[in-house]
Image (cartoon, helix red, strand yellow):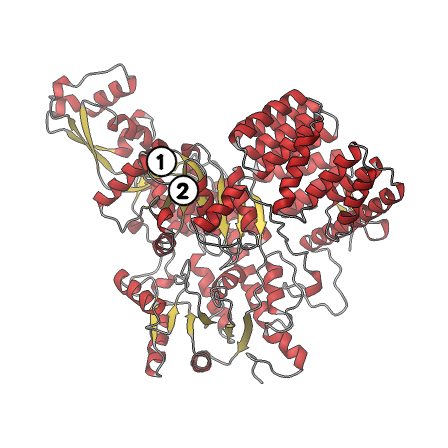
Amino acid sequence: MVAPSKLEEMVRLGPPHEALALTRADIDLLPAKLQWALAAWLRERRDFEAVAIVLDQIELRSGETLRLLEERARLAFATGDLAMATALLSERVDRAPSATAWIKRARLALATGDQATALAIGDDLARHHADLHSVQALTADLALATGDHETVRRHHEAVLQVEPAQIGARLGLARLASLEGDPDRARALLDQVVSEATLTRSQLADAADIARLSGESGRVAALHDRIGALVSAEMTTLRDAIADALGRKEPKAAESNSVVPDDNAALPAAMVDDPPLPLEVMAALTGTFGHAALRPGQATVIANVLAGTDTLAIMPTGAGKSLTFQLPAMLLPGVSLVISPLIALMKDQVEGLPPAVRDRTALLNSSLSPEEQREVLTGIASGAYKLIYIAPERLRHHAFLRALQAGGVERVVVDEAHCISLWGHDFRPDYLTIPHALPALGNPPVLAITATATPRMADAIATGFGRTLSRVTLSLFRANLFYEAYKVPNREAKIAKVFEICREERGAGIVYVSSRRDAEAIAALLRDRGVAAVPYHAGLEPDQRAENQRRFMQRQARVVVATVAFGMGIDKADVRFIVHLNPPRSLEAYAQESGRAGRDGQSARCVLLTAPSDGSSLRRVARRDEQSLDDVRRLYAAVQRQATGRWALVDFDRLKLRGDDHGDPDDAADPRITLGILEQAALTRRHPDAPVHWIVRPSSHQSADEIAPAADPLWTRFVAWSGLREAGGDGMSVRTVDACAALEITPIALSLLLSERPDVTAREGTRMVCLELLPIGGDAAVRVTDVLDRAREVAEQRIRQVVQYAAGDRCRHVMLARHLGEGLAPCRTACDNCTRAATDSPARGRER
């Protein structure tokens, strides 16, 4: 490997004989997760100049996020600039106040000797958030600083009553024993703690300090040795991950050039150490929701929601995502707004709620009549609900936003959060509405949830929301799922294999196909051969699609042959097999779709079928969402034609890009993708949907001549521009874009102006997508080309990863988990590759 010159070199990672030299350019190429890890490592090494450079690189990429403010505060504290550290953390609190942010501010005050500020913050938190574990821990630390040992003791003993093995509480009692002159008790408690194999560095450092207080110099040295070994291991892991990301990792002699890495190269799996929860939470869990215990990871997410911490929860299918926000919603004041992409998904969740929760839950979607929607809006504005389920496009409705503002939104939950990323496998442009709407709702905390996300996708989700998201990641591995892949000669052989699997397996199954035509044809073929099968795709009439889903859910049809539109949010636990007739769009999509099998914990098969022609099939699927510069130019020109000044109200039906009505509708380009590209390239900005026009007339008790000019200069300008007085009692029609261009206001400002006047009646026309055209700039083509090139690169990378997974001979669970940033040992018994290697003979799911 060629090392950078000394003049360019910024930092070296690792011992001299195997160090990795990095330049600023190298750091700029790293994924955000590794940039943050590098900054933390450099800060601990006290290379403060290098830390500042890394943080500057992060700011260039992501802007000044809340996490960046916190990291700069840590850096300032480490360099001794306490005033700067305090100012930065105060700014972070001002920008997004939450219990977690105030706790960090209090701890900084305590560390800098400002005990009065720390105590004041602690008292306020204890009054308003006394049930939060993190607040209770802060109260104990403040009590320790002021010599109130009894409060400290009560806190730690209460924690141990709920969770006897909790390390922090045992260390706290050991420290207390040392301070109170009881070294024997301190040593006994330390004996219990230091035998734990999974202590973190901070826990080891805490134990070493307690040992020092107790006069155990030998134990202090041993604990420092453990810290040193842990630091060395972490540094090696970081160095290898950075080398791998930069393509500078030396390959092993027998290693191939596959993008799917070797089993042993996997990073350590993300572990979740669930905290104890307040007794009220556990009481609601059993009394309201009827569960005896929480599943792994749920307590961590629930604790974050209770604390108001912005969180990304990566929880595979069946991990119990819904409970992590439904339970806190019933305990906390205010409304939890739940944003979900599909009506079916929302209906399933709401219908499955306990009656006491369902009575406080609203579902607002297009299936409701106008009168029902108005009734729900009234309930929202009056604060009648604790949970409100909507689709993301609802946030473009100004009347809905006004109802939310009246009722107050305390937290926002975004299901299927990966849909916000243009680079994701399931990008949904309507999700771009969410971050724009958050300020109008008071910037409440966000819980983003997804079943699968690579580390890079997790970064993209955080960037999409403009938040620093605390990540909670659960293991993807499910031992009851048997993964297998077959390579067959052609499409006919694939269909024969599907029929064979249907005969072998007695239970329900899903066959995923890539086109509507295949869904219909293969369902018909299976029916001809005696298999009760139904199709499911977006081209079916809604009633027929719902009927086919109902038949599958109620076991009247055993197999559903579907495009990827089927399955998201479908709660059917007894799916015994899932077959992909065509390679999936990405490994993330495959992990999510195959994960819908075996949710009851019983054995299930996940089968991938490939043929030599699949390369062109995958490229066709990738081209479906691929846009050219000409596509973008044509759509931008179409938007301009519908614009007046900088405002355009767009009808999607008039934005067809390519293809004709006689082609495969699955191959039609989605204009919403192109609009997403325009927004990424800073050419447009999306606003809440707005009416194309308004019908404005004097109120019934007034004539046009009696309309008051009012003291509002804007209203005076509107009346003069529109000619409303001259229009008489019949009123007039006002085009939104014309009024906004003439008066230099936004469509929302126009809506407020018209709807709040007592002397006129204003009725909305049809609402359409509202776009603001931004200044083009001289480099617009370059910006668009950069976005398109990146999208194309990501699509090609997905194809390579899927192909190499299908052909790979390593553990399939390991390949999927490693792609999603998790390390696993080979499953040995739950995939074709492992069972074939173990028996040296063809395993289930592998042809001779």
Looking at the rendered structure, the kind of residue marked 1 is Leu
Judged left or right of residue 389, residue 694 is left
Q: Is residue 522 above or below residue 595?
A: below
Residue 697's disc number: none
Q: Secondary structure at mark 2?
A: strand
Res. 421 visible in picture: no
Q: Quadrant of residue 809?
A: bottom right
Counting from the top left corner in percent of width and height, residue 41 is at 73, 42
Counting from the top left corner in percent of width and height, residue 441 is at 41, 34
Q: Secondary structure at mark 1?
A: helix
Q: Is residue 698 above or below residue 633?
A: above
Residue tagged by mark 2? 337
Res. 458 visible in picture: yes
Q: Considering depth in this image, is 224 or 589 the residue closer to the camera?
A: 224
> In the image, what residue occupies the spot 38% across and 41% down?
386
Looking at the rendered structure, the kind of residue marked 2 is Leu
Judged left or right of residue 264, residue 715 is left
Q: Quadrant of residue 151?
A: top right
Counting from the top left corner in percent of width and height, residue 788 is at 49, 51
> In the image, what residue occupies the spot 58% across and 25% down?
123
Labels 1 and 2 touching (C-beta < 8 A): yes
Residue tagged by mark 1? 404
User: In terms of sequence position, does the residue under pointer 1 or pointer 2 come before the other?
Assistant: 2
Counting from the top left corner in percent of width and height, residue 533 is at 35, 75
Q: Residue furthest right?
A: 218
Q: Considering depth in this image, is 756 or 826 the residue closer to the camera?
A: 826
Point out the image quarter for the N terminus.
bottom right
Q: Residues within 10 Å of mark 2 (few under 14, many from 20)?
A: many
Q: Residue furthest bottom?
A: 848
Q: Considering depth in this image, is 817 or 790 the residue closer to the camera?
A: 817
Q: Residues within 10 Å of mark 1 (few under 14, many from 20)?
A: many
Point out the image quarter for the C terminus.
bottom right
